[in-house]
Image (cartoon, rainbow, N blue to C red):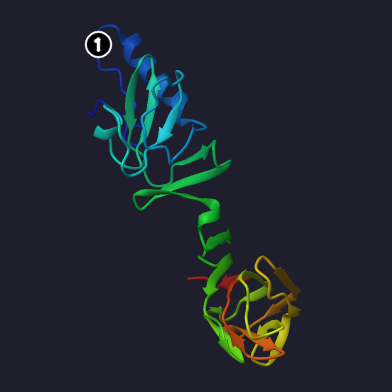
Amino acid sequence: MSEQSPRLSLPLVMPDQAQKHVTVNESLLRLDTLVQLSVESRVLTAQPSSPVNGQAWILPAGASGTDWSAMSTASIALWRDGSWSEIIPQTGWQGWVIDEGTRCVFGDGHWTAAYETSERVLALGEMGALTKAVLLEEELGALAGASVQTTITIPDRAIVFGVSVRTISVINGATSFDCGIASETSKFGGSLGIAAGASNVGVIGPQAFYAETPVVLTANGGDFAGGTVRVAIHAVVPEAPD
């Protein structure tokens, strides 16, 4: 029989064990950390000099300090009763990261915040059908010519809510630009700003697309002769059951 539980590594009381309260208390204290897990940060590399009892951190690569440097990247470093403990996470564990104000999930050896994923399942059926939100981004630099096309595309069978853009560096040559697709060049916005910082959220009535479709920026008043624009596609994609 294992002396620890398989998922949370909780110490188990053995038959005829003396001082059973020590093992039980250790399990309870470990649960106190892992149930409703909350960590201070996942980017702090320097081991804190004055942590508060019960505080925990997710260790980034390059963590330093006498104790932290001996622990694995992505593990949870817990300060309790005057010493550090390392907790190794398992796939599917979730926790709240205080300094980011967001929930993170552990998988594939690292913690991922909800806002860091380009796709997120909104609903999953018993037979494998799903509905997912999709956010695709691209930065188009050194704009040139009458129009520029993205390499990211609106997915086939996607229901699109809009395409947003932001001018990162001033656009030269054109006096404004349109954002759309090849057949509707201003579908997501027309006469958009060329100054750095100008932005537009080109929402549309939700529309289905039946083929992969790139976004096209079209110059007005002259060809593009420089500048940088970031483009984001906002959509929902359904997938059939298995």
| Location of residue 72 with respect to 2 vertically, above or below | below
Do we see residue 175 in this rendering?
yes
Task: Judge from the rendering whether residue 204 lies leftward or rightward of residue 113; answer left or right.
Answer: right
Taking depth in this image into account, of 162 and 219 the one nearest to the observer is: 219
Do we see residue 235 in this rendering?
no
Image position, residue 198 (x, y; %): 70, 68
Residue 16 sits in quarter: top left
State which quarter of the image contains the N terminus: top left
| Location of residue 32 with respect to 237 vertically, above or below | above
Task: Judge from the rendering whether residue 93 lies leftward or rightward of residue 147; answer left or right.
Answer: left
Taking depth in this image into account, of 10 and 111 the one nearest to the observer is: 111
What residue is at 52 percent from the left and 76 percent from the top? 141
Total numbered badges shown on the rendered structure: 1
Name the residue that disc number 1 marks: 17
Q: Amino acid at mark 1?
A: Gln
Image position, residue 207 (x, y; %): 71, 79
Taking depth in this image into account, of 16 and 202 the one nearest to the observer is: 202
Task: Give the SS element for disc 1.
Answer: loop
Task: Judge from the rendering whether residue 195 lies leftward or rightward of residue 40; answer left or right.
Answer: right
- Classify mark 1: residues with Cα within 10 Å, few (<14), some (14-19) or many (20+): few
What residue is at 44 percent from the left and 40 percent from the top? 42
Taking depth in this image into account, of 31 and 164 the one nearest to the observer is: 164
What residue is at 45 percent from the left and 21 percent from the top? 54
Image position, residue 101 (x, y; %): 58, 41
Image position, residue 62 (x, y; %): 31, 42
Question: In the current view of this chain or complex, which residue is farthest to the top?
Answer: 19
Task: Judge from the rendering whether residue 12 lies leftward or rightward of residue 122; answer left or right.
Answer: left
